[in-house]
Amino acid sequence: MDSVSLLLADARLPTGGHAQSGGLEPALLAGLRPDEIEGLLRTRLRTNVPVDAGTAVVVVSTSTVTEVETVVDAWNARVPSEVVRAASYRAARGYLRLGARVGLDARWARRADLPRPVALGLLARHWRLRPTDTARVVCHDEIQTVAAAALKLAPLDPLDTVQWVLQLRPEVDAVVDAVAALTDPDDIPAATAPLLEQWQHTHPTHPRRLFHA
C-alpha cells in the first residue's frame, strides 16, 4: 500500500469516524458479549463489507458523473435500511470535505446524499489508488472503527483488538480478491445482515449512547 492508502486507513484522519462504532454499540446494547465482537466483525466482513468494498472499487473505474450516480443507485439498492444509509451518508461528508481540500471536483463536496464507500472511491480515483488498495482500505476502516469503539464500550485489553486485525486477515484478503476486479455496478455484492440492521434501527432512539451509529 502506498502513502495515500495508509493515510486513508489511519484512524487519526479527521473525517469524523470517531463518531461511528461500525454497528458495535447497538449490538452490545442488544446483548452481544465482548467475547463475541470478533464474530461480529467476521459476519460484517462476509455481508456488509463486500458491498461497500465493491462499491468503492467500481467508483474507481468510473469516469463520468453519470457513472458515479449509477454506482450510488446500486449501493442504495443493496442497503435497504434508511438508518444504515443515513449513517453512511454522514460518514461520507468528512471524506468529501477532505476531498475538497485536496482538489477533488468541488461538485462532490457539496453532496449530502453520497454513501461512505462512494466518497472513498472518489478519493481513491482522484489519487489513482489501485483497486486492491481501495478494497483493503474499506476493510481496514471497518475493522479499526469497531476496534476503536470496542475499547470505549467494553472491558477489553487493547491487545485483543490488535489480535482481531491479525486474525481477520484471511477474511480481508477474501473480500479484496472478490471485489478488486469489479467495474460494473451490477456486479457489486448484495449480501445483508438483517439482525445487525434491526439492532441499528433501535439505536438512534436509545437514551444512552456514545456513537451516532
Image (spheres, grey):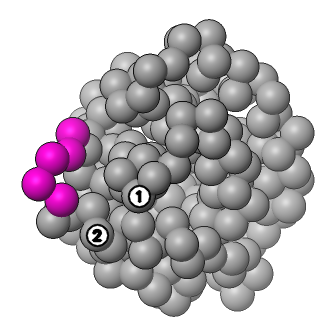
* Rendered image: mark on residue 10: none
- Is 211 in front, or is 49? 211
Q: Residue at x 42, y 47 (%)?
A: 28
Is residue 54 something that shows in the picture? no
Query: CA gap, disc 1 to disc 2?
Result: 9 Å
- Rendered location of residue 20, percent (x, y): 33, 44
* Quarter of the picture holding the C terminus: bottom left
Whether the residues at callouts 1 and 2 have beta carbons within 8 Å, the answer is yes
- Rendered location of residue 26, percent (x, y): 37, 55
Magenta region:
206-210
Q: Is residue 207 magenta?
A: yes
* Quarter of the picture holding the N terminus: top right
Q: Which residue is mark 1?
A: 30
- The three-letter amino acid code for the residue at tag 2 is Thr
Q: Residue at x 70, y 87 (%)?
A: 186
Q: Residue at x 20, y 46 (%)?
A: 209
Q: Is residue 147 left or right of residue 159?
A: left
Quadrant of residue 210 within the rendered picture? top left
Q: Which residue is mark 2?
A: 202
Q: Mark 1 vs mark 2: give the one in front.
A: 1
* Depicted 188 relative to depicted 153: above or below: below
Is residue 121 something that shows in the picture? yes
- The three-letter amino acid code for the residue at tag 1 is Ala
- Is 180 in front, or is 155? 155
Which element carries disc 2, helix, strand or loop?
helix
Quadrant of residue 207 within the rendered picture? bottom left
Q: What predominant SS class does the magenta segment belong to? A: loop
